[in-house]
Image (spheres, rainbow, N blue to C red):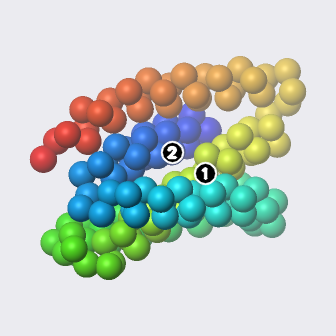
Amino acid sequence: MMTLVQCTTLFTYYLLAYLVTHFDQIYSTAFYGAVFESIATFISGMIMYKLGARKALLLFYSCAALGGILLLTYGLDHLDSLWFPVFYLLCRFGIAGPNVIMIAANAKIFHVEIAATAFGTGSFFGRLIASAVPLVSTLP
């Protein structure tokens, strides 16, 4: 299950980083995306310890899914709108949190003897799948 979390998180994280180059407002969107990513990174650990790993992942993935749905349904038709970067920022916020959660939850779920192997295996498959991001990001 953690391998699936790592695969989806890494693929989506890199896909959003590649897609920002296709936007009209590249620099402001990338800058604010980094700010929102930093905020999510700082608070995701606290949210995980308050809610648990499953609920925290569900919360962050829900933010990312909501941002993605809004981006696809409304944002792509209104690229010059102020809402387009807001939806993108919601996606970035929602996918940056699981980056921290998957590391912290791995150390909490697995014993010390197998924690590095479990995380390394998930990271290997996540990076392998994320290598397809440049190809997917150039699709129309």
Asked if one can make out residue 45 in the rendered structure from this viewpoint, the answer is: yes
Towards the viewer: 81 or 121: 81
Q: Position of residue 137 (x, y in %)?
A: 26, 42
**Residue at 72% from the left image edge and 59% from the top image edge:** 42
Q: Judging from the image, what secondary structure is the residue with disc 2 in?
A: helix
Mark sitting on residue 124: none
Q: Judging from the image, what secondary structure is the residue with disc 1 in?
A: helix
Mark 1 or mark 2, which has the lower sequence index?
2
Towards the viewer: 31 or 131: 31
Towards the viewer: 17 or 63: 17
**Residue at 45% from the left image edge and 66% from the top image edge:** 89
What residue did someone put label 2 on?
9
**Residue at 50% from the left image edge and 31% from the top image edge:** 126
Say what amino acid the circle numbered 1 marks: Pro
Horizontal side of residue 79 vs 49, given as left or right: left
Is residue 67 placed above or below 34 in the rendered structure? below
Q: Position of residue 18 (x, y in %)?
A: 34, 43
> Which image quadrant is residue 138 in?
top left
Say what amino acid the circle numbered 2 marks: Thr
What residue did someone put label 1 on?
98
Q: Label 2 neighbourhood size at 10 Å, few (<14), some (14-19), many (20+)?
A: many
Q: Position of residue 101 (x, y in %)?
A: 68, 49
Towards the viewer: 34 or 93: 34
Determine contact: label 1, label 2, CB under 8 Å.
Answer: yes
